[in-house]
Image (tube, rainbow, N blue to C red):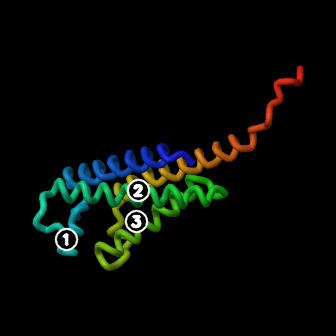
Amino acid sequence: MKIHVLFWTSIVSAVSFTVCLRLLQLFSIIHWSPIGWSKHWHLFSGNTPLFKWTTLAIVLFVFAIVIFYLSELCIAIRADIAAMGLSIILLFGLQWWMFGTVELKKVSIPIFVIIAMHLRFIVETAMFHKKAESLDTRSKIPYNTDVVK
């Protein structure tokens, strides 16, 4: 695996996911704060919102790296099915963590779409590069320059 693919995929996903969350909150599409965890855990409560959003982006960056590595291990599953299933699990986990219950009436479709898009981006990139790496290692046949073809 090439480390720059992992790094850039994770950074683009984390930054774009953070921007999408900020836009959803800005236009009142979601009725909860993505940086509300700082008040809930009494962590960074005195810091600026920019610092809290940056911390959220760093946590999402680490999460994207973990998902990237796990996606390379599950190369037999189709990327779209894996991303959809994982996004459903994450959506219900996020809802249970925020509200303490899982109700289908309170499921946010925009959050589901954003989670599914970003997970598909990460999973598909990881699987593509893993398959390309395995094909690249298979096609390295020793070439003898002394033989005339």
Q: Amino acid at mark 2?
A: Ile
Residue behind mark 1: 43
Q: Are marks 3 and 2 in contact (CB under 8 Å)?
A: yes
In this image, 67 relative to 37: left or right? right
Kind of element beneath mark 3 = helix
81 and 141: which is toward the camera = 141
Q: Earlier in the sequence, mark 3 or mark 2?
A: 3
* Residue at the (34%, 70%) spot, across then down: 95
The percent coordinates of residue 13 (x first, y second) are 39, 49
Residue 149 seen in the current view: no
* Residue at the (65%, 47%) spot, across then down: 131
Quarter of the image for residue 101 reads bottom left
In this image, 45 relative to 129: left or right? left
126 and 33: which is toward the camera = 126
Q: Quadrant of the C terminus?
A: top right
Give the label on residue 91, or none.
3
Q: Amino acid at mark 3?
A: Leu
Quarter of the image for residue 37 reads bottom left
Q: Nearer the viewer, mark 3 or mark 1?
A: 1
Kind of element beneath mark 2 = helix
